[in-house]
C-alpha cells in the first residue's frame, strides 16, 4: 500500500464516530449556514465507509485510490443533498451516493468499450459474477443456457444481454494495434485485416465535384429548351425524386409516351448545345 493511501486510511480509521445528535447538528449547520468545519467533520467521520465500500469493488482491477476518490465525490454529493429533518442517519443516506459514484467510475473506466447505462445493465454488470458463482455451486451444475436463463430472470434482463455481458467479463479488451501472432518478426496487426468497402475520401470528393459540374452544365444548357421541355427535364432529371412519365403526362394532359418523346428531344437539344460549347472552348 502506497504511503499516501496508508496515511489516508489511518486518518479515516482514527476519526471519531459521530453520535446521532451530533451528526444531525453538523448536517443542519452545513445545510443552513454552509459551515465548512461542519462539512469537514461529517465527511472525515464517514471516510471509513468510503474505504470499506471501495474494497468491495477492488476485483474490477482499478486503483483503490481512484475508487476512494470517486467515493469521496459521492460522499460530498450526499452531504449536499442530505435533509436532516427527515431523521435518517447520514451514513444510510450516503451509502447510496458513494456506491453510485464508484459504480459510474468503474463503468467508465473498466473497459474501452462502454457498457450499458440503464439500471438493469448496471445491475447485470455488478452482479453477474456473484450470481454465476452462486447458481453454479453444488453438484447439480447448470448448463450454460439454463444458467443464463436463471440470471436473466433474477436481474430482469434478456438472456442475450446476459450472454453478451458474460463474454465481455470473461476476457480483457484487445487493441486493434496488437500483433496477430506472437512472432516478433511479423508486423501484421488486427487493424491490417479490417476492410472498409466505402470509397476513399479523394474518390468521394472527385465524385462530388463531377456531380456539381454536370449539374451546372445541365442548368446552363436548359436555355435552349422551351417552357414545357424545361418543366419535364427539371422534374425528371433535376429533382431528388424524379417524376414518372405517367405522373407528368397527367399533369400536362398528354400521354406518358408523348412525355418520353419530349424528354428525349429536349436531351438531344441540350447535348448538341453542350457539344457546341465544348467545341467553342477547344477552338480558343
Image: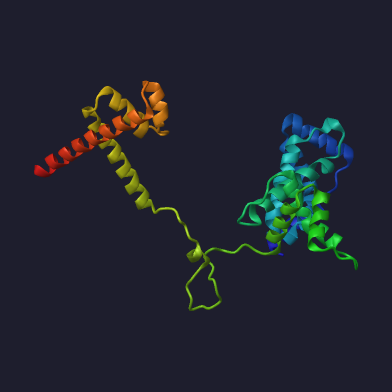
Q: Is residue 111 above or below residue 251?
A: below
Q: How far from the left and from the top, in percent, is residue 85?
A: 84, 30
Q: How far from the left and from the top, in percent, is residue 222?
A: 25, 30
Q: 72 or 174: which is nearer to us?
A: 174
Tell me the quadrant of the picture where the N terminus can be found: bottom right
Labels in figure, total:
0
Q: Quadrant of residue 230?
A: top left
The residue located at (79%, 43%) in the rendering is: 94
Q: Is residue 231 above or below residue 205?
A: above
The residue located at (64%, 54%) in the rendering is: 109
Res 100 visible? yes
Q: Quadrant of residue 42?
A: top right
Q: 41 or 140: which is nearer to us?
A: 140
Tell me the quadrant of the picture where the C terminus can be found: top left
Q: How far from the left and from the top, in percent, is residue 84?
A: 82, 33
Compared across the picture, whether 3 is left or right of 222 comes to right
The residue located at (71%, 38%) in the rendering is: 36
Q: How far from the left and from the top, in percent, is residue 123?
A: 76, 49
Q: Is residue 277 above or below residue 67?
A: above
Res 13 visible? no
Q: 39 or 61: which is nearer to us?
A: 61
Q: Is residue 220 above or below residue 8?
A: above
What colour scheme governs how the chains and residues are painted in the rendered image of this protein? rainbow
Q: Residue furthest left?
A: 284
Amino acid at each position: 500500500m502506497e504511503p499516501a493511501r496508508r496515511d489516508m486510511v489511518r486518518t479515516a480509521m482514527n476519526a471519531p464516530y459521530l453520535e446521532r445528535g451530533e451528526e444531525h447538528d453538523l448536517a443542519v449547520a452545513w445545510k443552513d449556514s454552509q459551515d465548512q468545519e461542519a462539512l469537514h467533520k461529517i465527511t472525515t467521520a464517514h471516510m471509513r465507509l468510503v474505504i470499506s465500500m471501495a474494497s468491495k469493488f477492488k476485483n474490477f482491477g482499478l486503483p483503490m485510490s481512484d475508487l476512494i476518490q470517486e467515493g469521496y465525490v459521492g460522499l460530498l454529493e450526499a452531504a449536499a443533498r442530505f435533509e436532516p429533518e427527515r431523521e435518517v442517519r447520514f451514513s444510510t443516506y450516503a451509502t447510496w451516493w458513494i456506491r453510485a459514484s464508484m459504480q459510474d467510475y468503474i463503468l467508465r473506466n473498466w473497459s474501452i468499450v462502454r457498457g450499458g447505462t440503464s439500471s438493469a445493465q448496471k445491475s447485470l454488470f455488478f452482479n453477474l459474477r456473484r450470481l454465476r458463482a452462486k447458481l453454479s455451486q453444488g453438484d447439480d451444475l447448470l448448463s450454460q443456457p439454463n444458467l443464463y436463463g436463471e440470471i436473466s430472470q433474477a436481474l430482469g434482463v434478456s438472456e442475450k444481454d446476459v450472454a453478451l455481458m458474460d463474454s465481455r467479463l470473461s476476457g480483457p479488451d484487445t487493441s486493434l494495434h496488437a500483433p496477430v501472432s506472437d512472432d516478433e518478426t511479423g508486423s501484421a496487426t488486427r487493424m491490417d485485416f479490417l476492410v472498409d468497402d466505402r470509397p476513399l475520401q479523394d474518390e468521394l470528393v472527385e465524385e462530388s465535384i463531377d456531380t456539381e459540374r454536370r449539374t451546372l452544365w445541365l442548368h446552363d444548357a436548359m436555355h435552349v429548351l422551351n417552357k414545357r421541355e424545361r418543366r419535364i427535364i427539371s422534374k425528371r432529371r433535376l429533382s431528388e425524386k424524379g417524376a414518372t412519365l405517367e405522373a407528368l403526362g397527367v399533369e400536362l394532359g398528354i400521354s406518358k409516351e408523348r412525355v418520353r418523346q419530349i424528354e428525349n428531344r429536349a436531351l438531344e437539344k441540350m447535348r448538341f448545345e453542350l457539344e457546341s460549347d465544348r467545341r467553342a472552348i477547344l477552338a480558343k
